[in-house]
């Protein structure tokens, strides 16, 4: 079965007839759930089952569930998990406790996802934070130290994996120096290539451990003074693939963000031509189902069929989803809460 080189969304908590027809015909490689599609456990379980039924295959269902501000599954229906920066703060005081807490937090969060039929999480955020990092990233990053980010990312990915969920590291080659929000503006980073090695060192250390990564809509003047990473063949081939050494599936950040500009189809075509494997589109700025469906159709048409090395990477990402390991969630929660209570006591 031929699949489209894209990940699209759905408009709400129930799969509409028009969306079912779209999924059946367009066959996006994956589907991402936004907050508008997550009301309660039974509803999300039914929705993920309906999506897979419409696709006619066991496709990956994605979500943005980082913890902190970025959580599509919200309390009180689902547990609240800390932002990455909380683990980073603890790492500065007690590295081993932070590593354990980060693993447990993501193991527990991963269980929530896998129980819902969601087996891919667009997390963790591996950007190296700076004093002037825009709040769009902010405490979504683990911290200001490459060592902390690498250690905590490995713990987070292991926690998710042990729960049956594969992570997506973001935002390559590093969005920590961006001082604008890519949802609305296009940041340009003027740091030289030697300075940017610090940011890239995080992804380089993780390159062989993760099957999926996400680009950022940021211009790095040292690499390509004109184009943001997502649509820059130079940055993708020379920096992400070569300097960083990442050979996993590379997806775009959300194509709907205003940083890219132009029509969705043009954004998608440029991203694929630049070397992205899969287009990600969330329709996060829209609420009307017909408008969301129209954007989904536009992105799927621009994506074309997943083939060649991109298809191989997609299959490898699917294979990376493992059966959950044995885990006592009650004991896990008790230990996690103990560790986080210790973190709060040190604030």
Image (cartoon, rainbow, N blue to C red):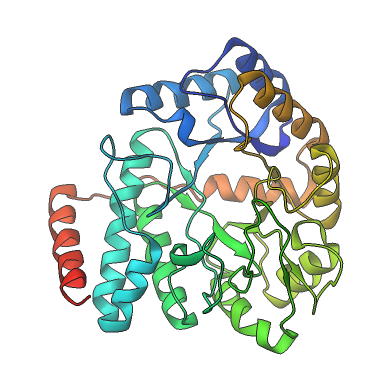
Q: Residue at x 35, y 48 (%)?
A: 110
| Residue with the most extreme top position | 17
Considering depth in this image, is 323 or 276 the residue closer to the camera?
A: 276
Quarter of the figure with the N terminus: top right
To which quarter of the image does residue 269 belong? top right
Q: Is residue 1 visible?
A: no
Q: Residue at x 53, y 47 (%)?
A: 319
Residue 315 against residue 239 in the figure, above or below: above
Q: Residue at x 71, y 58 (%)?
A: 217
To which quarter of the image does residue 283 belong? top right
Residue 66 against residue 17 in the figure, above or below: below
**Residue 144 left/right relative to 334:** right
Which percent across, then down, holds residue 226?
87, 67
Which percent across, then down, holds residue 273?
86, 52
Q: Residue at x 53, y 19 (%)?
A: 53
Considering depth in this image, is 67 or 278 the residue closer to the camera?
A: 67
Considering depth in this image, is 9 or 46 the residue closer to the camera?
A: 9
Q: Is residue 184 visible?
A: yes
To which quarter of the image does residue 155 belong? bottom left
Quarter of the figure with the C terminus: bottom left
Residue 72 against residue 50 in the figure, above or below: below
Which percent across, then down, holds residue 153?
44, 67
Which percent across, then down, holds residue 257?
68, 47
| Residue with the most extreme bottom position | 194
**Residue 212 left/right relative to 305:** left
């Amino acid at each position: 079965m031929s699949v489209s080189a894209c990940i699209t969304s759905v408009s709400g908590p129930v799969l509409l007839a028009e969306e079912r027809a779209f999924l059946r015909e367009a066959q996006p490689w994956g589907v991402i759930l936004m907050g508008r599609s997550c009301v309660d456990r039974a509803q999300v379980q039914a929705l993920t089952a309906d999506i897979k039924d419409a696709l006619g295959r066991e496709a990956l269902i994605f979500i943005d569930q980082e913890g902190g501000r970025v959580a599509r599954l919200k309390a009180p229906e689902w547990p609240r998990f800390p932002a990455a920066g909380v683990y980073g703060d603890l790492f500065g005081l007690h590295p081993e406790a932070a590593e354990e807490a980060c693993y447990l937090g993501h193991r527990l969060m991963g269980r929530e996802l896998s129980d819902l039929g969601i087996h891919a999480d667009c997390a963790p955020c591996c950007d190296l934070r700076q004093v002037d990092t825009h709040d769009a990233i902010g405490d979504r990053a683990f911290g200001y130290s490459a060592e902390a980010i690498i250690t905590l990312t490995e713990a987070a990915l292991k926690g998710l994996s042990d729960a049956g969920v594969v992570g997506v590291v973001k935002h390559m080659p590093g969005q920590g120096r961006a001082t604008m929000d890519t949802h609305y503006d296009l940041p340009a980073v003027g740091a030289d290539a030697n300075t940017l090695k610090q940011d890239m060192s995080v992804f380089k250390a993780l390159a062989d451990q993760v099957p999926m990564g996400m680009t950022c809509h940021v211009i790095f003047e040292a690499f390509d003074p004109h184009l943001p990473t997502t649509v820059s063949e130079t940055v993708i081939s020379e920096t992400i693939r070569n300097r960083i050494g990442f050979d996993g599936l590379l997806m775009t950040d959300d194509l709907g963000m205003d940083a890219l500009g132009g029509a969705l189809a043009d954004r998608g075509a440029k991203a694929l031509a630049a070397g992205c494997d899969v287009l990600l589109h969330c329709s996060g700025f829209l609420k009307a189902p017909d408008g969301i469906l129209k954007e989904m159709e536009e992105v799927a048409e621009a994506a074309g069929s997943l083939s060649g090395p991109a298809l191989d990477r997609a299959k490898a990402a699917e294979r990376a989803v493992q059966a959950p390991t044995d885990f006592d969630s009650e004991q896990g929660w008790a230990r996690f809460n103990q560790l986080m209570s210790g973190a709060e006591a040190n604030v």
